[in-house]
Amino acid sequence: MKKIRKALIPAAGFGTRFLPQTKAMPKEMMPLVDKPIIQRVVEELVDAGIETVVIVTGWNKRSIEDHFDNNFELEEKLLESGKTDALNIVREISNMAEFVYIRQKGIQGNATPILNVRHIMNDEPFLVFWGDDFIDATPSRAKQLVEAYERYGSIILGGMPAQSEDYYKKYGFAGGVNVGNGVIKVDRIIEKPGSKEASPSDLAIISGYVYTSDIYDALEKAKENLKEGDELVYTLGVQNLIDQGKAVYAVELQNAVYRDTGNKLEYLKTVVEYGLDHEEFGKEFANFLKKLDL
């Protein structure tokens, strides 16, 4: 079984929910206290053993590339100023992994970035994480997904139980046979079923996937069968594989908190929680909040 060494982060969206802020700043670069969202995603991947991070971007996402690149002028300035702590932080960002960037091409849909990176991933398994949301979990989401892949050797979908009726309108849902320890062998997956009654289960496939090279041809087949105006979504490829008899597993992530930082209110909540946990000023921030007349 091949080791998971690579990860894909799709980051080509416009971030319209955060306009006008995202007119010039990619949503993935929105700060969570002192780090952009996408950096926290990359750190989780690297901590789980990922060596190469492939980011699929759009025309307005150059600042993502700049963030993970070496900035020799900045490093020289920090060195001259004796700011060694800041210098080390800056250098660590660009040294975390090998970064590869490509522009998204193709029809609309969350599966298009997967086809875009086929020539980079080749026949290796790889993780897919979004650049504008993440999950806090122990062990980390990435480590749980990698562990599941090492156990089952197949496509792994990360999921969490639906928290509200709205989930059925926003996420894909997987159903199948429970094989224990929060894992199901998937026999059907539905993109945005719309209601609990129409869903195969209450397990929302929210954020985080392991794909094998089988996914490419399955998505190409799905693309050929799309009707005009339809989007190419990952669930179509996964269902094609299931129909072919391929094993697909969905894992309920344990000890997990979903951070939908693409949502304004949830973003604000996350900023506050991370601010309260900050080792430098968390206590002072907590005292400030207590003084507010809320």
Image (cartoon, grey):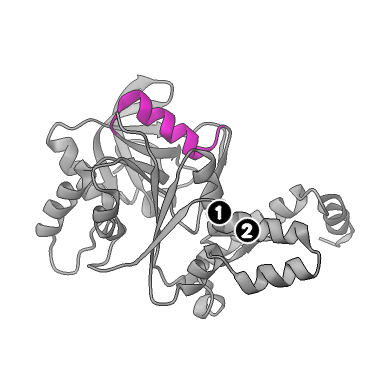
Q: Amino acid at mark 2?
A: Arg
Measured along the vertical axis of the image, is residue 128 above or below residue 142? below
Tell me the crowding category of disc 1: few under 14, some 14 to 19, or many 20 or more residues within 10 angstroms, Cα based: few
Q: Which residue is mark 2?
A: 91
Measured along the vertical axis of the image, is residue 172 above or below residue 65? above
Q: Is residue 65 left or right of residue 1?
A: right
Residue 29 tag number: none
Check if residue 145 falls in the magenta segment.
yes
Q: Residue at horizontal 40%, vertical 68%?
A: 13
User: Where does the magenta region start and end?
Assistant: 139-154
Q: Nearer the viewer, residue 57 or 98?
A: 98
Q: Which residue is mark 1?
A: 95
Q: Quadrant of residue 293?
A: bottom right
Q: Is residue 77 left or right of residue 171?
A: right
Q: Residue furthest top?
A: 180
Q: Nearer the viewer, residue 56 or 137?
A: 56
Q: Amino acid at mark 1?
A: Asn
Question: Residue 227: image x %, image y %?
Answer: 12, 63
Query: Can the viewer see residue 252 in this picture?
Result: no
Q: Residue at horizontal 13%, vertical 37%?
A: 243
Measured along the vertical axis of the image, is residue 263 above or below residue 251? below
Question: Residue 215: image x %, image y %?
Answer: 22, 45
Q: Residue at horizontal 16%, vertical 43%?
A: 240
